[in-house]
Amino acid sequence: MMDYTIPQSGRAALDFLAALGVVNTPLTTKANEALAAAGLSEDTLADDLDERAKQIESTLAEIPAWRGANLLGEWHAEHHARVASEAFRGMEAELKPTFESLKQGKTTLRPDPNLSVPKYWLYPVHRTTGGWDKERHMGFIHGELIHRYLLTKLPRPPAAASAPGDIYTHRKLTAEEAPRRDYKDILEIGCSSGPYTLQLAGVYPQAKITACDISIAQLEQAQRNGNHHGHAWTLIQADGRATGLPDASQDFVTSFIILHELPVDVITDILREAFRVLRPGGDLVFGDVAPYNSMSKLNTWRTDYLAKFGGEPYWRGSSTMDMVGTLKKIGFVDAKSYGMKPIAYPWITYGHKP
Ligand SMILES: C[S@@+](CC[C@H](N)C(=O)[O-])C[C@H]1O[C@@H](n2cnc3c(N)ncnc32)[C@H](O)[C@@H]1O
């Protein structure tokens, strides 16, 4: 991990955000009790998700615990990236020499100033002002202050308490799901600041890793991570639908948590591109969130609700599409989709190019 200290005021603000999660848990429990008291259960909840949302949300509308949870959730969604950006401003000058020195090393970055950025990508994902690239240093802010600091501090829900839980372990588990360890060329799509790339490098130390992303701010932080750890990654600013890599040049194409941030047609195009660049005999593993048909009706509604208000407009589409059918249509064989035990997260999508 890069060496830095978060100034006290920024750290306190981030700690406050994390503490909101603790308050939220009992409020959610109370809201669940209100639903049970109103007779809403897996048997009585509607099959249609929009109908179900009306049933649940009209029941909860007057429940103070629910209104409180929404208020806190809204505040968190609206402020987390802004609080993290402010914390960064207090460290920016001190980090400048580190940022300069970490441009040097074996990890290279090839920007594409002419890349035409897709419209869906400009959506303020996670309710972040301007999405992935508006804030010049979103790579450090998202990768270090939100992911490494804030998310690892959040309390884990009881169902996940006994599972291997931190966000880096999830990435390692996904990297290990591929059936082989001898891949020579690996392509990661949507690498962001490189947290999954780091795990890939650990699981496949002999492989040449290429990673693409649209966001230059994220790629710059990925380069710092690669160079800090002495890796020789090839980072390219490219759309995962058209990477520019030669046909049949990769043995393994992989990604972690990009699918739920993509419209269904983009996912299909990315899977097609993965098939094109894979060599015969190559594998695809994408790790992401669980599809709706694997969850209870109540949890499906909750996930959909949080996605809708949390700046995740593509979550429902990707969580209800036929991933295995799409893989098969493209030409993959042995296609499968399954949740890792014990909490069905990460959810793995696998395909093999014959
Ligand atoms: C949730 S982040 C992925 C996180 C990262 N893989 C990790 O392990 O944390 C989604 C990333 O996908 C990138 N992305 C979105 N659409 C893309 C596309 N068509 N091609 C390449 N990257 C894309 C975004 O810029 C963003 O950095």
Image (tube, helix red, strand yellow):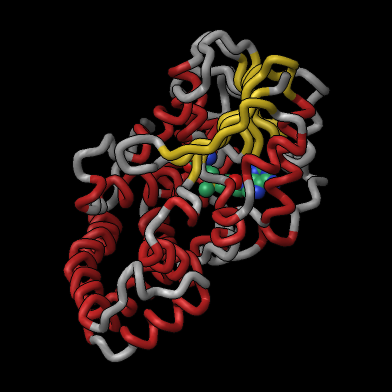
Q: Which of the 4 image quarters holds residue 135?
A: bottom right
Which residue is drawn at the image coordinates 40% and 64% (left, top)? 297
Q: Quadrant of the N terminus?
A: top left
Q: Which of the 4 image quarters holds residue 79?
A: bottom left
Q: Image height check: is 299 above or below 106?
A: below
Which residue is drawn at the image coordinates 78% and 44% (left, top)? 113
Q: Is residue 113 left or right of residue 230?
A: right
Which residue is drawn at the image coordinates 76% and 30% (left, top)? 331
- Spot occupied by residue 110 in the image (x, y as percentages of width and height): 71, 32
Q: Is residue 161 visible?
A: yes
- Spot occupied by residue 279 in the image (x, y as percentages of width and height): 74, 17
Q: Which of the 4 image quarters holds residue 77?
A: bottom left
Q: Image height check: is 169 above or below 10?
A: above
Q: Quadrant of the C terminus?
A: top right
Q: Is residue 320 left or right of residue 42?
A: right
Considering depth in this image, is 178 or 192 the residue closer to the camera? 178
